[in-house]
Structures are given as structure tokens and as C-alpha cells.
Image (tube, grey):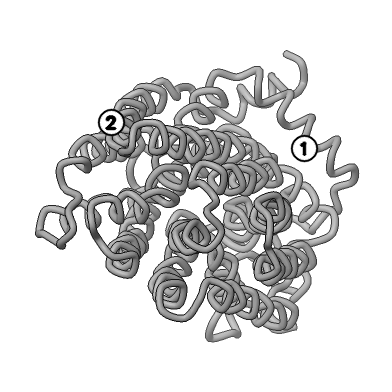
Amino acid sequence: MSTPQMRRIHPAWLVAGVAFIALMGAAGFRAAPGPLMIPLNEEFGWPISTMSVAVSLNILLYGLTAPFAAALMGRFGVRGITMAALVLIAAGSGLTVFAQAEWILLITWGLLIGLGTGSMALVFVAEISGTWFVKRRGLVTGVLAAGSATGQLVFLPLVASMAENIGWREASLVIAVTALAVVPLVFFFIRNHPSDLGVDAYGAEPGTTPPRTRRIGAVRLALTALRDASRTRTFWALAAAFAICGATTNGLVGVHFVPSAHDHGMSITVAAGLLAVVGVFDVVGTIASGWLTDRVNPRYLLVGYYTFRGIGLSFLPLLLDKDIHPSIVLFVVVYGLDWVATVPPTIALCREYFGDRASIVFGWVFASHQVGAAFAATAAGLVRDAMGTYTYAWLGGAALCLVAAVFSYAVRGTSTSNWAKVTSGG
């Protein structure tokens, strides 16, 4: 095989490019629940709070699957796990068209899609950037994390428009077909390790990339990493802050922004368009955050991100209206820049502290993200049904963001030597 110096483009960039597309395909259903809730409510009379439970199960499994998926990627390779995940997402979305009872959503929206998207969660980003890149890791992490936002950008207006004008079943089938269409790209272009192509990771000195080792006992490895990480203050601070991150993005805004805007008289399509703008600026913000993570203390970045997010949420109840005003546009722009900007510095802190188990430990940190999102998705639905408004849900999210800023500031002493003492029992 030719050396990296003989290639005009290092194969790591091709792997990263296809990984970006795969993340876009997996993000299709993440754009769907908000726009689909309203037509399902109108056709079947199912309460928003009931459908929120199915979404919460999806979000919860999305997070709890992640650390085990990271371990399985080490055992069987990232390519096989990614293809299986895309098939599960397609099955869950496609089978939704047969739903005639609320409990079916627990299987399709909840179980199948939760397991599939969980295997394509941000641990996939950490695995690709950590395995294939030495230089530009922060930037690549930011670009790949933005892949999910780009997927939402592509699918959200389409799903909303189809749900409102054609039918929610057709919208579900589009998501299923898209997820399946990505599978061949993953099979032909993604490889598990640079050694599979006879090259070193991008930016590594020739011959310094360690060979791929198959991890055995995925469940045991994931649980052992959790046991060791849970002995450190850094893990709990990161997990608590990231739980609030999930609550204030996927759980609150991702699921309930469209229904909340609809409560104020805004059409589903227009509200979904605003949420898509969040996706546009999320791409910009996450890539910029990756660039900054290579240059600025990640702890300080997280403090700033959570503080600005809290300020934005505190104003949201005053900004929603049946018409689009400059103030709500400003909100979606600022919130978009901050949406997944927390991911690159969080992954960087995990890598700095937890060394070669960073991907698995980040999987557990990400699990807390989804636990927070699941709680917020259900709680906001209950608040809406009980009080007829989302106002208290938005204000509660704003207060939590300030707590996350405090937790992020508490992350200190990131040292792999400290982590080595923990894992050795010292």
C-alpha cells in the first residue's frame, strides 16, 4: 500500500466524509417526532404526553446504547455496527406506518430507533476522530458532530411539509428509505482502522499508529469503564453538565419547539423551518467549537456555552408568536450556534483524562445526556398538558443551564496519570 505521503488525499478524510453522510442519514428520525406528533394527535387523538413517552424511550435508549456500542465497535469494527444501526433506524421508521395503537410507538419510535440511533450516537464521532486522526481531531469532531444537525436541516422541513400536506406515513417512509440508502456507502468506504489500508492515522509520525486490537467482552468492558470513571469527580461533573445539555436541546427544543410554536398560532411548516435554521447555525457553531477546542481550555468553552444557552431559553416564552419576528430569528441563530458546540470540548476532556478508554467513557457521559433529554421530553409534555403552556418548561431549562455552567467549571485536574492511578486501584 502506498504511504500517506504518496497520496494526495489521506484516506482518513474519505472515512470522515462518509461518516458525516452516515450521521446525516441516521439523523432523519431525530427531526421527525415534533412535526409528526400533531397529525397523529389529530388522526388518533393520542395525547402529546403519551407520544412524549415513546420519544423519551427513544432518547433514553439512544444514550444507554452508546457505551455498549463503543465497546462493540472495538470488538467487531465500526463499519458493521454502523450498518446494523442504519437498518434498525429504517425498520423502526418504516414500521411506524402500521401504527394503530399508542403502544406500537414504544416499539418503533422507542425500541428500534432508540437502539439504532444509539449505535450511531456521538461515540461514533469519538471513535472515528480518535482512531483516524492525530492532528485536527477537534476540528474533525466538530464537523462530524455537525453531521446530525445537517441531517435535521435536510429532513426537518421535508418531514414537516409532508406531514402537513401529504401525510405522516409518507414522511416516515422517506426517513426509512434514506437510512437504507446510506448502508452501501458505509460498506464500501468506511474501514475500521488505518492499518486496514496500510497507513498511519492522519498527522501521526510514520509507523507510530498502534495496531488495531480487538476488544473482547463488550459488556464487561463498558461496565468496567463506568466503574473506574465513576470514581473520579471529573466524570460526574461532565455527566451532570451533559445531562442538562441533553435536557435543553433534544428533550426540550428538539421535541417541543414545534408544538409550542403551534400553540401560539404558528403553522407546523413554519415552526419546523425555524428549527431547521437552528440546524444551519449548529453546523457553523459546532465546527467553530471544534476549532476553538484545539486552542482554548475546553472547560472555559463549556462554561460560556451553557451560560448563553440559559439566557436564550429564559427569553423564549416572550418571543414565540404566530408570525416570524426578528427576535425569534435571533434566538434560533444564537441557539443554533450553541446547540452541539458542547460536544468537541466534552470529548476533548474525556480524551485528556480517560486516555484509551475515552470513547467508552464518553459513551457513558453521552448516556447521561440522553437521560436528561428523556426526562425533559416527558416533563415538558406533562407541563403542557397540565398547564396548557410550555412557559414553565422553558424557564426551568434556563435555570438548569446555569447549573451546567457551574458543573463545567468544576472539571479540574484532567490528567491521564490520575486516571492511571484510578484504574490500577491507586
Above-or-below relation of 303 to 109: above
Q: CA distance from mark 2 to mark 1?
A: 36 Å
Which mark, by number, is residue 272? none
Mark 2: few, some, or many residues within 10 Å (few <14, many ≥20)? some
Q: Give me the residue at 70% from left, 49% from top.
A: 103
Mark seen at residue 222: 1
Q: Earlier in the sequence, mark 2 or mark 1?
A: 1
x and y, in percent, of residue 97 in the image: 66, 70
Which image quadrant for residue 392?
Answer: top left
Q: Which mark is residue 395?
A: 2
The amino acid type, in three-letter code, at marker 2 is Leu
Q: In the current view of this chain or complex, which residue is farthest to the left?
A: 326
Decide: few, some or many residues near mark 1? Use Cα within 10 Å; few <14, some 14-19, many ≥20: many
Give SS at disc 2: helix
Q: Is residue 396 visible?
A: yes
Residue 330 pos. (x, y %): 16, 55
Type of amino acid at the residue the image marks with label 1: Ala
As drawn, which residue projects farthest toward the right? Answer: 216
Q: Pick out the residue farthest to the top.
A: 426
